[in-house]
Image (cartoon, grey):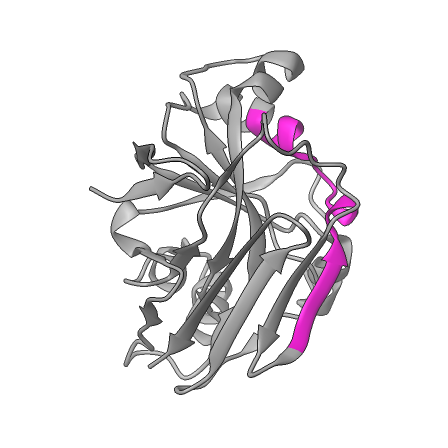
Amino acid sequence: MKTAKIKNSNWELPIRKIVCVGRNYVEHIQELGNEVPEKPVVFIKPASSLIYSGDKIIYPEFSQDMHHEVELVLLIGRTIKNADKQTSEDAILAYGVGLDMTLRDVQNQLKQKGHPWTIAKCFDTSAVISDFIFKSEYQLSLNEEIYLKVNGEYKQKDPLAKMMFKPAELVEYVSSLMTLEEGDLIFTGTPKGVGKVNKGDKLEAGIEGLVTLSCSVS
């Protein structure tokens, strides 16, 4: 079973499910030509898709256009259902940074046919996570910048405050749809600047003053 590792601690939490939020930054919505949603767009990745900082992202043979998407990741620390805003905030145990790797060519084909995005989002190594830091050790102001570099060059860099739906709002909304359990992860959406990666690329991602990860594409 995959686990979430906590910085400055020997504690690891088994990961249950990975809930992802799409279209949570307006400029990213615009760069892909999508409509701004009234509610968060939610999809799921399997835990089998998960790898860690230092691991390799494997380029699937059935795609020619894999994109990077850097995201704030929330680690849930208690079981909740239909939670209010305060309960949702309290359920966030720790923060990390993650990559939601996306097969853009496959996704576009699926969208044109009205099909789910599963094939484009759930392949092996499509989710990368850093270590996490307890919320009790660091309280997000949302002024922190989230970033991603490809081969040392910044491709994504924006303050977390640009999220349309903030962390507690996302937890509250997801808990209205499904039970959230201890060990669940919520990927909170990506800012503008997504783009294609190639085999051999080195990716570095982070949230200012908080967490970092690095990996390569093969």
- Residue most toward the left? 1
57 horizontally vs 33: left or right: left
Viewport quadrant of the C terminus: bottom left
Indicate the position of residue 94 as horizontal and vertical percent values. Answer: 52, 33
Q: Identify the residue at horizontal 31%, vertical 37% (top origin).
A: 15
Instruction: Give the total number of marks visible in the rendering.
Output: 0
Residue 3 covered by magenta stretch: no
Q: Is residue 159 above or below residue 138?
A: below
Q: Is residue 82 above or below residue 194?
A: above
Residue 155 covered by magenta stretch: yes
Instruction: Give the magenta range.
Output: 154-171
Q: Identify the residue at horizontal 72%, vertical 64% (top origin).
A: 157
Indicate the position of residue 174 as horizontal and vertical percent values. Answer: 52, 28
Q: Nearer the viewer, residue 122 or 34?
A: 122
Q: Nearer the viewer, residue 110 or 202?
A: 202
Q: Is residue 129 above or below residue 63?
A: above
Indicate the position of residue 64 as horizontal and vertical percent values. Answer: 41, 84
Q: Quadrant of residue 149?
A: bottom right
Q: Is residue 117 visible?
A: no
Indicate the position of residue 207 as horizontal and vertical percent values. Answer: 64, 53
Q: Identify the residue at horizontal 46%, vertical 28% (top origin).
A: 76
Q: Is residue 78 above or below residue 116?
A: above
Q: Is residue 162 visible?
A: yes
166 horizontally vs 151: left or right: right
Q: Identify the residue at horizontal 32%, vertical 63% (top origin).
A: 125
